[in-house]
Image (cartoon, rainbow, N blue to C red):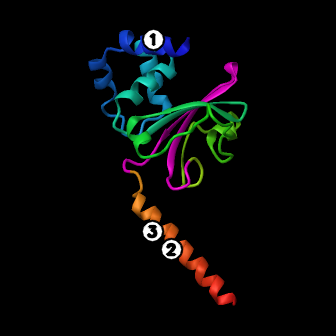
């Protein structure tokens, strides 16, 4: 039901030309920036972010978590094509323990830049959060670097690690 409401909001309540104009300066947006648009269009924060994810060329994702686990997530097309996504409907995925979502509202932060290894093994990410305690959920917006790491570099790193391991094993004989 909520998905249909968000689709309706995107099509009717957020005119595409106006929405593009309002978000054209969003290079690394935080959820706080989307709050202003929520008031402008009188729709939910989730509807605003989902609409932006459909139109942006940024590598970005919304993650909704409940009780310490990812309930659902959706990334931009560009992020998905770079191989970054969560399959929360297929498996139970805990939110990263060093993420703002895991630290909770008591940490006093609404956004933070994380190094590789928090949300993604190979990439750092800008995380902004809104804690909806009344609904028992947390909304995280993850903004990834503009360009994905090269898959060739990852393959070379793995090969280099294997070579180092093999050299170590040979030295033990």
Which residues are the magenta region? 120-147
Report which residue position mark 3 lands on.
Answer: 156
SS at circle 2: helix
Using the image, determine if residue 75 lies above or below residue 148. Answer: above
SS at circle 3: helix
Q: Quadrant of residue 108?
A: top right
Q: Tell me which residue sits at (68%, 40%) in the image.
A: 94
Give the left or right position of residue 128, taking residue 150 as reference: right
* Marks 2 & 3, CB-CB < 8 Å contact: yes
Between discs 1 and 2, the one toward the N terminus: 1
* Marks 3 & 1, CB-CB < 8 Å contact: no
Q: Quadrant of residue 156?
A: bottom left
Q: Which of the two residues, 104 or 121, is positioned nearer the viewer here?
A: 121
Give the left or right position of residue 64, taking residue 6 as reference: right
SS at circle 1: loop
Report which residue position mark 1 lands on.
Answer: 42
Give the left or right position of residue 91, taking residue 51 as reference: right
Using the image, determine if residue 142 lies above or below residue 11. Answer: below
What's the mark number on residue 160? 2
Q: Tell me which residue sits at (30%, 18%) in the image.
A: 16
Residue 77: percent from left, percent from top: 39, 36
Indicate yes or no whether the magenta region holds residue 131.
Answer: yes
């Amino acid at each position: 039901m909520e998905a249909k409401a968000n689709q309706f909001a995107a099509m009717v309540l957020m005119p595409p030309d106006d929405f593009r104009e309002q978000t054209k300066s969003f290079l690394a947006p935080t959820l706080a920036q989307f709050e202003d648009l929520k008031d402008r269009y009188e729709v939910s924060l989730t509807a605003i972010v989902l609409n932006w994810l459909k139109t942006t060329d940024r590598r970005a994702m919304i993650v909704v978590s409940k009780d310490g686990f990812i309930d659902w997530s959706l990334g931009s097309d560009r992020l998905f094509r770079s191989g970054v996504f969560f399959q929360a409907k297929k498996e139970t995925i805990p939110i990263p323990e060093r993420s703002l979502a895991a630290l909770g509202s008591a940490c006093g932060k609404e956004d933070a830049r994380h190094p590789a290894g928090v949300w993604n093994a190979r990439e750092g990410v800008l995380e902004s959060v809104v804690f909806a305690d009344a609904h028992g959920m947390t909304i995280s917006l993850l903004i990834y670097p503009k360009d994905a790491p090269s898959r060739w570099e990852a393959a070379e790193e793995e090969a280099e690690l294997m070579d180092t391991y093999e050299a170590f094993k040979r030295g033990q004989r």
